[in-house]
Amino acid sequence: MPISANAVVSIHYTLTHPGGDIIESSRDGAPLTYTHGTEALVPGLERALHGKTAGERITVSIKPEEGYGLRSDELIQSIPRSVFHFDGEIVPGMRFQADSGRGIELVTVMQVNESDIIVDANHPMAGETLNFDVEIITVEEGQEEEIPVS
């Protein structure tokens, strides 16, 4: 069965930086299972997998626009320390959930000073080219409870 909308797909993947360093891999554990066409994967990878079948292996390079997007300076902002409700020291690199007015987003602390905390709401891999090596393990027709209602 080819991968199409609402198919339940299991894959093993390795994600690498353009230089070859591994970012993430499922190969030492359970495969990733997702429902195709539900935006569970970055758009470029989902497009590359569409129409493929179990047993196939693909290598694909996804540009930032088809991955986690381009970095945006508008997503970096200074927030008053008083907004943070956190017991303990806040240090660069920490991640928090924030209500942005567009929903809950993850932000990364970039800098901390006496009165403000500078956070970045860009995805950590925004602006990065994503290189995937994917092995399609199974492709099955989605069961009714797995298919999202639109």
Image: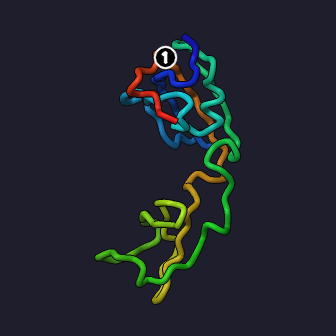
Q: Nearer the viewer, residue 4 or 81?
A: 4
* Relative image position of residue 76 (x, y in whole percent): 60, 70
Q: Nearer the viewer, residue 15 or 116?
A: 116
Residue at x 58% of width, y 28% of height: 133
Question: Position of 35 compared to 53: left or right?
Answer: left
Residue 3 to residue 130: above or below: above
Tell me the element at label 1.
Answer: strand
Residue at x 56% of width, y 55% of height: 123
Count of numbered tags:
1
Q: Nearer the viewer, residue 115 or 140?
A: 140
Q: Residue furthest top?
A: 1
Question: Position of 131 compared to 55: left or right?
Answer: right
Residue labelled with disc 1: 139
Q: How is the protein colored in the picture?
A: rainbow
Residue 4 to residue 81: above or below: above
Q: Residue furthest bottom?
A: 114
Question: Position of 3 compared to 143: left or right?
Answer: right
* Relative image position of residue 27 (x, y in whole percent): 43, 28
* Relative image position of residue 38 (x, y in whole percent): 53, 34
Query: Quadrant of the image for the N terminus?
Result: top right
Residue at x 43% of width, y 30% of height: 32
* Relative image position of residue 7 (x, y in whole percent): 50, 21
Residue at x 70% of width, y 42% of height: 63
Q: Residue furthest front?
A: 150
Question: Position of 93 compared to 131: left or right?
Answer: left
Residue 89 to residue 125: above or below: below
Three-letter amino acid code of the residue under disc 1: Val
Q: Residues within 10 Å of mark 1 (few under 14, many from 20)?
A: many
